[in-house]
Amino acid sequence: MKATIYEGNKTFSVIHKEVEAPAKGEVRIKVAYSGVCGTDVHIYHGMMDKRVSIPVTIGHEMSGTIDAIGEGVSGFAIGEKIVVRPLDDRGVKPSDKGFNHICEDLKFIGIDSPGSMQQYWNVPSFVLHKLRPETDLKLAALIEPLSVAVHDVRRGELKAGETAVVLGGGPIGLLVAMVAKETGANVIVSEVNEKRIKKANELGLNAVNPTKIDLVKYVIEQTEGRRADVVFEVAGVQPALDVMCEVAGIRGRIVMVAIHGQKKEIDLFKFFWKELKLIGARVYEKEDYEKAIALITANELPFEEMITDVQPLSNIQQVFENIDKNPDGMKVLMDCQS
Ligand SMILES: NC(=O)c1ccc[n+]([C@@H]2O[C@H](COP(=O)([O-])OP(=O)(O)OC[C@H]3O[C@@H](n4cnc5c(N)ncnc54)[C@H](O)[C@@H]3O)[C@@H](O)[C@H]2O)c1
Ligand SMILES: [Zn+2]
């Protein structure tokens, strides 16, 4: 079989190796598609070399079918369509209070252990979610990032008729905006990249550029002064942190989706003055996956538009080089069987 290997120093290689039998408690997946995540790009840039054990196969946004079933695994059949929720929570402790998805000893499969950018992938059976026979496997590679968005909207307790402002129109921000709109909210996306604004518009979203218009004034106008009920911070930059407390209305909820690696400045006075709430949101829980699977299977939202390129596994090096050259694209999928 074909597998890709990240070797450090911005280098991937493609190797041929024996297909392995699944160990006890595991299944072997025939991987259909594996999406490139922002985290994979960070790994490629060497920013996570201390965490990944080089050489390693990365990838965690995938879809596939069951190819072999290990000892002790029941409830799955060969050929069944599945996705992986790449959270290894085997180290969960009572002090994690049942929140397995953010347990202290959580391991992320595809970063802390081998991932999906290969033809066949062995994983413990507890990470599997079944798809429906009619679920499109290409769209299903979006289930992992879509589950992030579903979780974020759920954490924000967004309701129909409320106004949501999404700061950042990258892949995660646009999926958050799509889920927020599907919830029945009025959604405003703020994005600085004109190509991404165009993409948001193609997805039927209202997107504006905060470097060209006064975003706070615009949100005030759009809401007759009420401002946003929920703000999603999905940009990960200081200007977004500056504006999030301004666009949030009285008792607004701010959902922190972006990963801020360093301490940043936030106007805490606004939290006091408007009784704002700041809510952390990290990955997803089982129910978020099930909702994302239902959304992808129904295929009533423009998910197809999110996939900007599909490339064979053997092109992995070019794929990552191209993402650096053209960072405007949305989701690139690796076709793991071609
Ligand atoms: N919470 C989680 O579990 C989780 C999961 C996945 C990703 N993330 C994080 O979510 C964030 C978004 O992910 P992504 O893959 O979409 O990243 P991305 O970098 O592709 O998207 C960020 C977007 O913000 C835009 N932006 C920059 N400055 C802005 C500004 N001042 N106002 C508005 N937009 C601005 C950028 O042009 C870009 O399109 C990242 O920080 C990522 O690490 C978190
Ligand atoms: Zn991801």
Image (cartoon, rainbow, N blue to C red):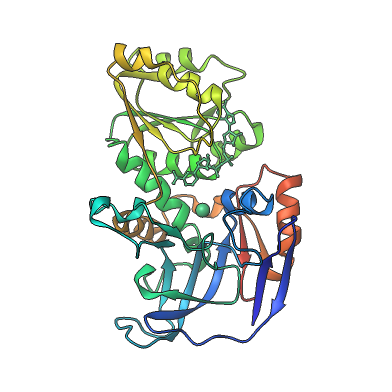
Residue toward you, 65 or 11: 11
Position of the N terminus by quadrant = bottom right
Position in image of residue 191 (x %, y %): 57, 30
Q: In which quarter of the image is residue 266?
A: top left
Picture residue at 48% right of the left edge, 24% below the top: 241
Residue toward you, 224 or 24: 24
Q: Can residue 128 be seen in this view?
A: no
Picture residue at 27% right of the left edge, 57% below the top: 93
Tell me: 238 left or right of 294: right
Q: Can residue 44 be seen in this view?
A: yes
Position of the C terminus by quadrant = bottom right
Reply above or below: 326 against 207. below
Position in image of residue 213 (x %, y %): 57, 16
Q: In which quarter of the image is residue 84?
A: bottom left
Position in image of residue 255 (x %, y %): 38, 33
Q: Quadrant of residue 186?
A: top left
Tell me: 272 left or right of 319: left
Position in image of residue 285 (x %, y %): 32, 54
| Image label count | 0
Reply above or below: 56 against 324. below
Picture residue at 38% right of the left edge, 39% below the top: 181
Tell me: 296 left or right of 213: left
Reply above or below: 186 against 23. above
